[in-house]
Amino acid sequence: MNTPTSELWSIAPARNTAHRVSAFDGSRISNDLDARGCAVIKGFVSLEECEALARLYVRDDIFRSRVVMARHGFGRGEYKYFSYPLPGIITELRTSIYPRLVPIANRWNEAMGIAVHYPEKLADFIKRCHEAGQLRPTSLLLQYEPGDYNCLHQDLYGEHIFPIQITILLSEPGRDFTGGEFVLTEQRPRMQSRPEVVSLRQGDAVAFAVHHRPVQGTRGVYRVNLRHGVSRIRSGCRQTVGIIFHDAM
């Protein structure tokens, strides 16, 4: 039986916002993002939340668009962008975690000489996006089946970009799928690219740099360029949700 559409918007997190934020180890996550451009957050959402989010994929009426990656040279697989209003759990995840990432984002921009300061509240940043014509929500659900993969890319949708985003694994490796590792590459000036393969379990999240991050060198701070993707799925079905904090043109 399909869940009524009205219920999909009111999916409540199994754990309240205060508990989720208290489990967010800001110091470790900041250190990991500084060192590697990514940080794993164990058990970021509950198994019940994973299942509820995964079930949303069949409901075309709550999404603004569906992208078949092979048609655009993005890889293989597909994803769907949510429409506004977002499901309750997506809204809660964005609004509760954004303030925890703002200090890192502002520190990064200052270190890289980027004259952009992010406000403390997500609503104020979204207002900035909308005033610039970035009106379309960017939170999305992704689905991969055997042989699917996601090419290395960056989620840049307009002038205003929040420099950190989050991907949450909704499926369990080894049970629901095999293969499908999250991959991050870092390009440093006059150096070969550095790969990072991130191991996740169901309900884990990875926070990572969208575009650039600062690195301390012998002659000061310089920018490195990052891209992310997913390796080939060998069997089963892999689903993830992407939490991106800037809206799109």
Image: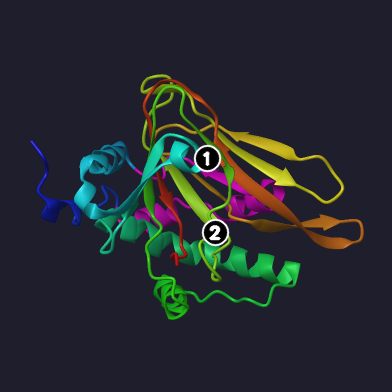
Q: Residues within 10 Å of mark 2 (few under 14, many from 20)?
A: some
Mark 2 — residue?
Answer: 156
Residue occupying image coordinates x 42% and y 57%: 21
Residue 32 highlighted magenta (yes or no):
yes
Q: Amino acid at mark 1?
A: Gly
The image's mark for residue 73 is 1
> As drawn, is 10 to the left or to the right of 175?
left
* Residue shown at 60% from the left, 50% from the top: 28
The magenta span reads: 16-45
Of all residues shown, which one is farthest toward the right? 219
In the image, residue 160 above or below residue 216: below
Dot 1 lies on which element? loop
Q: Position of residue 18 (x, y in %)?
A: 36, 59
Q: CA distance from mark 1 to mark 2?
A: 17 Å
Please report the residue visible at 32 percent of the width from the left and 52 percent of the height from the top.
Answer: 65
Residue at (46, 74) in percent of width and height: 129
Q: Which mark is residue 193?
A: none
